[in-house]
Image (spheres, rainbow, N blue to C red):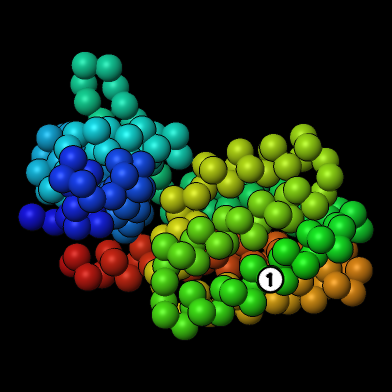
Amino acid sequence: MERAGGNDPSAGGEEPELLSDQIRNVLTDEIASGALPPGMGLDEQELANRFGASRTPVREALRQLAVTGLVEIRPRRGVIVTQTTPERIMEMFEMSAEIEAMCVRIATYRITPIERGRLIEMHDASEALVQRSDIDGYDKFNREFHEVIYGATHNAFMAEQALTIRNRLKAFRRTQLRHGSRLARSREEHEAILNAIAQGEGDEASRRMRAHMLNAASAIGRYIATQTRKDV
């Protein structure tokens, strides 16, 4: 029996929300790698048995996956893994790259000392996550790092749009961290972005961010290809 986090919340272990996140992360990787192929049905009770959990955190995990578009919840027909091609993933990352590049360019000229200090502090702390290959921890840091940049635009509408697109891609943005040395490379790319911000070079920060996002897209493509070869 495979347990996400190792405990059933009803047995006094972790909170249901945390367990649902862990279940979601496992299913995200399996969908992105093709282990759970498009069109496959996902049964709540079977998943609950697999993870040693009640159906409540499983249901929440599936709801979160539906928000990102990885699964479709069909009334009276259950939950189905949706069709997401590598080409479609690249298109989404390409769009996200342009939005994020715009955000960091504007943020470079509007960021406050407190916001800049927060980014540097977060970046410094991320080194330990890379050293211990903490994918879940780095994924959380990565999300917060980018969200600080959105906020630093001081344009609420732009930040909302960037966050909406990010949420659509968050499953894949996590999975790409599993490929090779992507954790270390991602951190290096963040450092280059921070240096451009510190120098007040908005166009350079924008270029670095665009490359950062497209590198992430390439990493997930390689990860999916690697997993596919393993299954052959």
Q: Residue at x 59, y 74 (%)?
A: 125
Q: Quadrant of the N terminus?
A: bottom left
Q: Is residue 110 visible?
A: yes
Residue 77, quarter of the rendered image: top left
Identity of the residue drawn at 77% across and 35% down = 157
Q: Position of residue 179 (x, y in %)?
A: 41, 72
Q: Position of residue 102 (x, y in %)?
A: 79, 52
The residue that mark 1 highlights is 121
Is the residue 118 above or below the residue 188 in the image? above
The foreground one among 142 and 93 is: 142
Q: Residues within 10 Å of mark 1 (few under 14, many from 20)?
A: few
Q: Quadrant of the C terminus?
A: bottom left
Residue at the bottom extreme of this rendering? 131
Image-based side of 168 in relation to 207, left or right? left
Secondary structure under the numbered disc 1 in the rendered image: helix
Does residue 221 appear left or right of residue 28 in this picture?
right
Relative image position of residue 146 (x, y in whole percent): 66, 56
The residue positioned 14% from the left and 56% from the top of the image is 2
Q: Quadrant of residue 189?
A: bottom right
Give the amino acid at mark 1: Glu
Q: Is residue 62 visible?
A: no
Furthest residue in direction top, as rendered = 76
Residue 190 x/y as whole percent: 67, 71
120 vs 59: above or below: below
Note whether 41 is above or below 7 in the view shown.
above
Q: Residue at x 72, y 71 (%)?
A: 120
The count of marks equals 1
Decide if residue 210 is on the left or right side of residue 89.
right
